[in-house]
Amino acid sequence: MVTTRFRITENSKGRWKALGFLVFLLISLAGCSNKLAVQMSPTRTVLANGLTVIVQEDHSLPVVSLLFSVKAGAINEPDTKAGLASFVVRLLTQGAPLDQLVAKLEFVGGRFLTDADRTNSIVASQVLSKDLTLALDLLSCSLTKAPFEPKQVALERESIILELTEAENDPVSVGQKMFDKLIYGTHPFYRPISGYKQTIKAITRQDLLNYYHNYYVPNNTVLAIVGDIKTRKILTKIKKQFASWEKRPISRPVIPAVAAQKSIKQSKLLMARQQTHIFLGNLGVKRNNRDYYTLLVLDVILGSEGMTARIPQVLRDTLGLAYQAYSNITASAGTEPGVFESYLAVSPENTEKAISKLLQEIRTIQHEPVSDQELADAKTYLTGSYYFDLQGTEAMAEYLVFCENHGLPFNYLNKYPNYINSVTKQAIQRAANKYLQPEAYTLVVVGPK
Amino acid sequence: MRDKISSWLQRTTSFVVLVICFLSFTTVAEGQGQRAVLANGLTVLIKENHTLPIVTTMLFYKFGSRNEPLGDSGRAHMTEHMMFKGSRQYGKGEMDAIVRKAGGWLDAKITMDFTSYSINLPAKEWTTALAIEADRLRDCNFEPTAFEAEKKVVVEEGKMRLDLPFVVFKDKLKQVACQGQPYSNLLFGHLEDVAAFSLTSVKKFYDLYYQPNNAVLVVVGDIQSSKALRQITKFFGPIPRGPTPPPITNKNWEQKQSRKLESRADVPYSIIEITFQAPACRSQDGYAMRLLNHVLTNGKCSLLNKKLVIEQPYFHEVFSDYPETMAPYLIFVAAELKTGVKRTKAEQILLQELENLKTVPLADQEIEQAKNQIEAEFVFLQENIQSQANFIGQSELLSASADPSHYLQGIEAVTSQDIQRVAQKYFINQRRTIGWLLPDSE
């Protein structure tokens, strides 16, 4: 029996609420064009030690995904220890007794992943549901008992430095780092997540342990668990598993605000390559920005990847200048401001022309309202395609953690079509003028002379 | 436990072959797929998945860069680009716009063996995919202005690849190892050739291979199989069967002696990559080679990683790859050298590990682990309809059976002796090519 993780509701009248997937089938078979929405029914519990646990059952496959998200990332590092957060997560898979647990998980074909971004770190696993206990043992060990053995610290340091050397040869990585540096000034986002060679060399084992002990605490962590499990049973198990993980106060650095630039900033970096890589943009917005949904629609019309948006259409389809051409402002919007960023890779002789065409497109969306057709098409795209991002237990766990971290209700997707559908042409033009800066941009060009 | 999962897989992955006229009366057990062949030769594979109201439609054509004349490739890739530039019912850019407007997106992929087009849509709009694919199957526009503009885009795509040293090295290695064979053809061709392609020559390629009898249509998602097949027949049925595409001029591929390649680039460390001629992947030897590939490098506790990265750290990382191809191709084993490790030592130590496989049988535990991994990967893949459609289509092309249970049974049947046998048979000097990518500075 295939059961579904969603309850389908008829958005406008709510008549079909909570009747399950069959309702959708009945509606669609009847040929109606009702707007359907997704409603999830996870259970959210905060344990005595402060660990937030979100459970969503989904019995369609014998699979479980577990995702722990710790609210700490590169933003929490001091300047002199840049790369600390990602150094820490690399060591959460190593040393006794982790090695034995990793070996057991690998034996059954389970997946295990640790990673850090600018604001969060994750420790995650996906397993067949029969291997759930194994995954929990490994994850709890990783979160609470990582040994940071000196030998492994040394080996990992060597690997990171090697990767940083490798990145020095990559024009896209070099360009992106320079772009962030120019945009963010003194805000910690100016630093690359992976740090710099000199800061990686400066990080001591004690730094790693301090960071781990300060931030990896239950009251700073969210767990989403999705899949072939029973809510009550799994909650009992988790309470037991993490009973000895103690709540502790967390000290956090003060994050400076970041100001929008007032004039053009440019940087040209020479690298002998076939193509020139162009990064152009300005400081963006936070996820809770009131114009976020307007900007989502703007992204689809102006520059989202694919061939329909204006920037790829002009630069790729019409002029044949680039294989890759896009822009985006919403993808990087988080708890801190992201960036509006356009990227083009072109033959060196076309650099000036490509930049000028790109700026022209940004100016046009500021000066002229988008067409009714463009607006309608972007809306149907956004309200139709999001189901694809919700496939599987991993994606679902990510969605739940995202909602929790951004203060969104778990059923926020129900409202999503309405948010999108209420965006107007005027709002897009206003947002384009407010958030895109074709007269005060940051431009980084990486390529040959 | 292994039996339990296997039986679950068996239940939910098999395909039922249907005779079209009885289709509407057939009840299919949940989880099973359906297979049909239309009168014009189009193979159709349908799998219902009602988890979400979405559908993926993939059309696979049985050609890739290996179908092109030796050393004169890139037209297969060029046709793939032109397929988005308009057809009888759709102007340039319209397909993308229509699909987006319907709430979906489209994509394409070309390999050495096949070319696939994928359209992902909300279930209520899914037949838009059929309309587009049926239209461009035989009526792609090849409008001259669009063709000239697209050649420039393809050249930019090629230049992007030229800026990736490992990609360039891999292309060279492939050319050396498969010398004189169709698999040595470059997927993207040589850029100067691409710039000079004539519209006629690309159109000629299109006419040869874009035929219903040379294609496999896969639909996975929230559809009802019998209704879906009726719709598919409505769109694709009227397309006449085309001439049978020319066979591949694949001479008997027998490498007589070992080969070498040395290349330099702006890279921070030396890389050794060894290839051996390998068996066709969906064969008894192929399943054993697939497991062997997993045993070698899949995961922290894999054989080479444990020995040569962790216990005796000669390498930063080790990789291996046994690509799924239609004809016999290669297995690749690669490693990144740590500073101070001599090239001769690295080469000798890596070859010795492969040599050991011929004499020392693998422990049951190692085989069991690789089997568990492959099985779990397969279950995880079922969570996503695009991955499912891709797997089903590839299985049909690689083994003329879309039924994944065949693949799983093939894997399950492999023994330690089988692995030893394939090591002895394929890891031999004259089937070998050793490639080195060295830093410019060295």
Image (tube, rainbow, N blue to C red):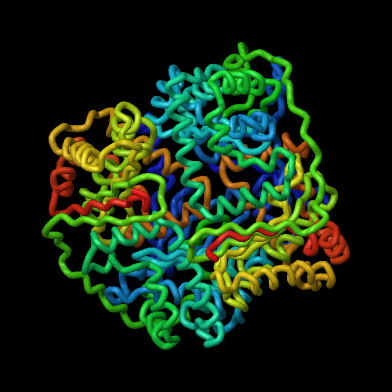
Vertical placement of residue B177 versus B12, above or below: below
Q: Position of residue B289 (x, y in %)?
A: 25, 46
Q: Quadrant of the N terminus of chain B?
A: top left
Q: Position of residue A396 (x, y in %)?
A: 62, 41
Left or right of B122, for residue A335: right
Q: Position of residue B231 (x, y in %)?
A: 54, 70
Residue lying farthest top? A244
Name the residue located 41 percent from the left edge and 80 percent from the top edge: B206
Q: Nearer the viewer, residue A165 or B88?
A: A165
Q: Position of residue A317 (x, y in %)?
A: 60, 75
Which quadrant of the figure has residue A19? top right
Vertical placement of residue A74 versus B123, above or below: above
Left or right of A40, for residue A61: left
Name the residue located 66 percent from the left edge and 23 percent from the top edge: A215
Asked whether residue B302 is in view, the answer is no
Name the residue located 74 percent from the left edge and 40 percent from the top edge: A186
Q: Nearer the viewer, residue B237 or B21?
A: B237
Asked whether residue B17 is in view, the answer is yes
Left or right of A359, for residue B106: left
Q: Nearer the viewer, residue B314 or B193?
A: B314
Which quadrant of the figure has residue B189? bottom left
